[in-house]
């Protein structure tokens, strides 16, 4: 996702649900994006609709644009369960995987 409120909400949702995220800059070359997604083994991709052409991800896609934050429509955040989730992860769990340029020219994932 591009830097936006949607991106921040997506990251917080992933962490709150006990997952780990892989930040992918949509300005990266398509080959780098494809490598990072495949190498990380990500089962889910949070994406903005206009970025679909950047990846041929075969797993589950969740479009951030499908949620209209603060709107009262049926697909809005207001229609979702707003109760606070109990934490299911802690300081010893993986939070994200950051990819560096790597000394070999291939990106290298570092677990944080």
Image (tube, helix red, strand yellow):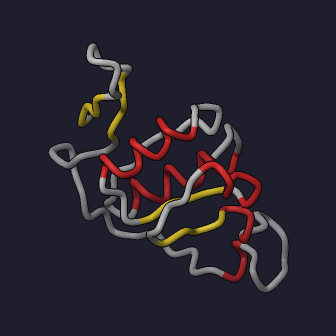
Q: Residue at x 36, y 52 (%)?
A: 38
Q: Quick one: 91 or 66, which is closer to the camera?
A: 66
Left or right, residue 49 beside residue 29:
right
| Image vertical order of residue 50 relative to residue 106, above or below | below
Side of 100 where 64 appears, left or right? right
Q: Is residue 110 above or below residue 91?
A: above
Q: Is residue 63 left or right of residue 94?
A: right
Name the residue furthest top.
103
Q: How many marks?
A: 0
Going by the image, does 106 lie left or right of 24? left
> From the viewer's perspective, is residue 57 above or below residue 8?
below
- Furthest toward the bottom, the residue is 74
Residue 58 place in picture, x, y as percent: 47, 68
Name the residue: 34% across, 28% down: 107
Q: Identify the residue at the far left of this view.
A: 92
Image quadrant occupied by the C terminus: top left
In the image, residue 81 lies at what x, y percent? 57, 80
Quadrant of the rendered structure where residue 106 is? top left
Which residue is pictured at 39% across the width and 54% down the height?
A: 15
| Picture layout, residue 69 above or below residue 108 | below
């Amino acid at each position: 996702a591009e830097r936006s409120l949607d991106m921040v909400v997506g990251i917080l949702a992933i962490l709150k649900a006990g997952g780990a995220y892989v930040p992918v800059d949509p300005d990266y070359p398509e080959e780098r994006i494809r490598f990072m997604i495949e190498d990380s083994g990500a089962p889910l991709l949070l994406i903005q609709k206009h970025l679909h052409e950047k990846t041929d991800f075969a797993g589950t896609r969740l479009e951030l644009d499908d949620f209209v934050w603060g709107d009262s429509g049926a697909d809005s955040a207001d229609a979702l369960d707003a109760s606070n989730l109990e934490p299911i992860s802690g300081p010893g769990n993986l939070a994200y995987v950051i990819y560096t340029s790597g000394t070999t020219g291939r990106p290298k994932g570092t677990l944080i």
